[in-house]
């Protein structure tokens, strides 16, 4: 019973600490979903643009709160609308690694350095990966529908506050509610079951091994960019190096076994190999750089435990509100429109 009580306390403390940032993040995500012009997205990622298209695709993808599986249908639509292989790959790499919601949640749990480093790493790997795919696979001209049936929609889309709230707190949140909950459960389990200093004792002096281990563990998993945060925080508190945790934050959301087949079909097998290689190599290199920075995490972070973090009243209230919203999204999943 003591273990269960400690686990529930660790679960709620992390959830409450993230909740205010997640509420703000999902609101901004809803604004992006409603107010970002889709025809513009299609136009700036055309196959004729080459590396310019890659850059634009990555800039669009970094702030979007879309997971590694949710990004597949969007990338497919972009590809069919005329996006090149390079821009599509850059979008696929950069988008799931981070987003407005996960940036804010990262700041709440892991501090400002990680909150800045995650989108920077997503941007750089997106550019390099998109460029590599462009060089390896070249570009073709995807078949684009020539009919005007989708260009003259008579009904004006709803771009008001109601649409923003529905997109942010219903549609987008519904896509991450299950993996976020699972991530929090794993975080609580790690906190309670693993002894303090577990990784420091078992892998002491093997920082490079930790980096590759997290790359291997992150590859087959499906975990969204927000759900990965509490897991990474718990692992660091158990002695995992900050760099290894950063590797997990990159590889876990960016690629998983379920999406490889779809990506191969979308951009080609050779391009998919380059896509995966860039993510893994980029994550290991980024993790190594993070380990060189002694102040990557907030002062005293490694001495804290999730049980000892005391959320404020604002955190508790935000946690209750977000929990009710998540429960609604779980019990009444929205019809995607």
Image: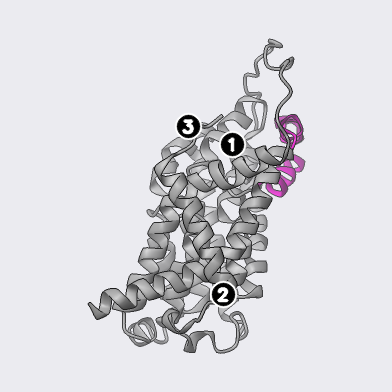
Viewer-closest of 52 and 42:
42
Viewer-closest of 95 and 168:
168
The answer to whether residue 21 is above or below residue 58 is below
Asked whether residue 317 is in view, the answer is yes
Horizontal and vertical percent position of residue 48: 74, 30
Numbered marks: total: 3
State which region is magenta: 36-63
| Magenta stretch encompasses residue 255 | no
- What residue sits right under mark 1 in the picture? 137
Density class for disc 1 (Cα within 10 Å; few <14, some 14-19, many ≥20) is: some
- 10 on left or right of 29: left
Quadrant location of the C terminus in the rendered image = top right
- What residue sits right under mark 2 in the picture? 313
Report, in whole angstroms, how far the alpha carbon at label 2 lies from the one at label 3. 49 Å
Helix, strand or loop at mark 2: helix
Helix, strand or loop at mark 1: helix
Disc with the residue nearer the chain's start (1 vs 2): 1
Report, in whole angstroms, how far the alpha carbon at label 1 lies from the one at label 2. 53 Å
Image depth: mark 2 or mark 3 in front: 2
């Amino acid at each position: 019973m003591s273990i269960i009580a400690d686990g529930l306390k660790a679960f709620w403390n992390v959830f409450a600490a993230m909740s205010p940032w997640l509420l703000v993040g999902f609101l901004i995500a809803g604004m992006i979903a409603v107010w970002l012009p889709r025809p513009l997205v299609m136009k700036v990622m055309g196959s004729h643009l080459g590396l310019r298209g890659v850059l634009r695709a990555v800039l669009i993808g970094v702030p979007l709160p879309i997971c590694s599986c949710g990004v597949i249908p969007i990338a497919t639509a972009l590809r069919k609308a005329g996006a090149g292989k390079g821009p599509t790959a850059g979008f696929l790499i950069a988008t799931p690694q981070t987003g407005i919601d996960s940036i804010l949640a990262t700041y709440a749990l892991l501090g400002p350095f990680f909150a800045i480093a995650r989108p920077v790493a997503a941007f750089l790997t997106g550019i390099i990966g998109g460029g590599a795919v462009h060089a390896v696979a070249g570009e073709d001209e995807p078949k684009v529908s020539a009919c005007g049936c989708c260009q003259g929609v008579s009904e004006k889309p709803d771009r008001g506050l109601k649409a923003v709230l529905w997109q942010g707190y219903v549609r987008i949140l519904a896509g991450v509610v299950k993996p976020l909950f699972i991530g929090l459960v794993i975080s609580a389990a790690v906190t309670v079951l693993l002894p303090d200093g577990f990784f420091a004792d078992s892998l002491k002096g093997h920082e490079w091994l930790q980096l590759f281990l997290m790359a291997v563990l992150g590859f087959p998993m499906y975990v969204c960019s927000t759900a990965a945060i509490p897991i990474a925080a718990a692992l660091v508190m158990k002695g995992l190096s900050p760099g290894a945790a950063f590797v997990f934050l990159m590889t876990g959301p960016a690629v998983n076994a379920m999406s490889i087949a779809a990506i191969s079909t979308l951009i080609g097998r050779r391009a998919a190999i380059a896509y995966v290689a860039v993510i893994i190599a980029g994550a290991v290199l980024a993790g190594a750089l993070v380990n060189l920075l002694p102040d990557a995490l907030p002062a005293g972070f490694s001495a804290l435990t999730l049980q000892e973090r005391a959320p404020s009243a604002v955190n508790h209230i935000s946690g209750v509100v977000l929990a009710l919203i998540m429960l609604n999204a779980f019990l009444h999943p929205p019809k995607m429109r």
